[in-house]
Image (tube, rainbow, N blue to C red):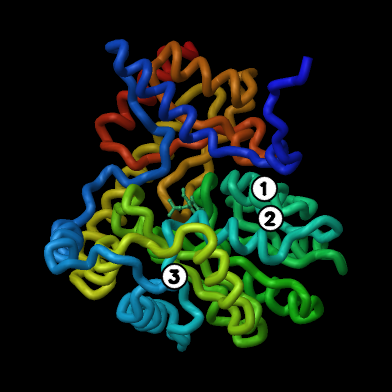
Amino acid sequence: MPTTAPMLADRMNSLGTETAFEVLARANALAAQGKSIINLGIGQPDFKTPEHIVEAAIKAMRDGHHGYTPAAGIPQLREAVCRDLHKRHGVEVDPGHVMIMPGGKPTMFFACLIYGQEGTEIVYPNPGFPIYESAIRFSGATAVPYPLREENGFALSAKEVLSKITPRTRLLILNSPANPTGGAVPKSEFDTLVAGLVDWPNVTVLSDEIYGQMLYDGLAHTSLLSYPEIRDRVILLDGWSKTYAMTGWRLGFSVWPADVVRHADKLAVNCHSCVNAPTQFAGLAALEGPQDAVHAMVAAFDARRRVIVSELNQIPGFRCVEPRGAFYAFPNIEGTGLDSKTLQTRLLEEAGVAVIAGTSFGVFGEGYLRFSYANSTENIREAIFRIKAMLT
Ligand code: PLP
């Protein structure tokens, strides 16, 4: 009998996933059964996209912006991105190096496809955003993790990162402020890292700065674009999803080295053609309009951060360092005697609290849970109350 099993490409076995979407689906299913669920799992702002941004998209649709745009995005948005980068980081960027992308994720995927293949290595943070490891493996490259350590506030150690680089390394992925830990790398550590990278001219840096505007305690963001020594080999990943509460719009941007942007453009033409036109006009309004909503959102996250860290530290068996950016807390839960996945499952099924196991972000995430504090203070307090009740 001929087999009817589909014959899939081997590379499909190397693709990972983002567990947050699975936890979200299970949390929604439980909620649909009438269970009370507090979702501290998914990483998206609980605020609405500011009204003037929504209006700009509606106007663009009414004005007839219904067609394809250049694959790299409408010129006025690419120019606005350059002005924004100049304002925030003091750097000059050529709009010809900017790609408007359908979110932040495609930039990491494209970068891994452009630089990774069998026999090469890509160095990435662990625990880190799970798509890094997935995209690296999919490219055929070997995924080489560098650990982020609790005792270091989950900031990378430049020395440790540099020790992972070999003649086979093509790409180094950085992410500060970070998902899932909330760690932020001090400028002095980036200075050391960049000084070391001068010895590795064949290594390109992918700097994921999507949480760059979400920093606390007066910390300033350091963009990797601001280092002239490596400027010709930095890919910047940024976007609107987190800063402007626009996760579902699918809008991001990247800045590429001069000789690489055409490859990213070609991948875009092959893959998605362009970002839908009205969303690009919304992105323009976001960059050019008032920024009060951004500041208000960051202030709200900061207030919740203080609440969640203090509350988490009161749960028996939990220990939580202060996150410095993004909207995640990453407590150590070893004292509960449970592994991360078991605790994630029990918290959702028994206490109705959705959080993500640290192991969803890599092997070095064992012993931790990720809490997103993009939820009301009231819900955060109720979630902690339920967790305490379940564990005691
Ligand atoms: N980079 C990091 C570190 C993230 O946490 C996320 C989303 O959670 C992304 C990139 C992807 O963002 P987007 O939804 O715009 O694709």
Label 1 crowd (10 A; few <14 / some 14-19 / many >=20): many
The amino acid type of the residue labelled 1 equals Glu
Label 2 CB-ligand 1 distance < 8 A: no
Query: What residue is shown at x 65% (from left), y 58% (from top)?
Result: 156
Please give the residue where the numbered disc 3 appears in the rendered image: 71
Residue 133 image label = 1
Snapshot quadrant of residue 65: bottom left
The amino acid type of the residue labelled 3 equals Ala
Residue contact at pointers 2 and 1, CB within 8 angstroms: yes
Helix, strand or loop at label 3? It is: loop
Query: What residue is shown at x 37% (from left), y 40% (from top)?
Result: 373
Query: What residue is shown at x 39% (from left), y 23% (from top)?
Result: 27
Q: Earlier in the sequence, mark 2 or mark 1?
A: 2
Helix, strand or loop at label 1? It is: helix
The answer to whether one can see residue 144 in this image is no
Q: Quadrant of the N terminus?
A: top right
Tell me: residue 147, above or below residue 99.
above
Residue 224 image label = none
Please give the residue where the numbered disc 2 appears in the rendered image: 124
The amino acid type of the residue labelled 2 equals Tyr
How far apart, in angstroms, are the residues tagged by discs 2 and 1? 7 Å
Q: Earlier in the sequence, mark 2 or mark 3?
A: 3
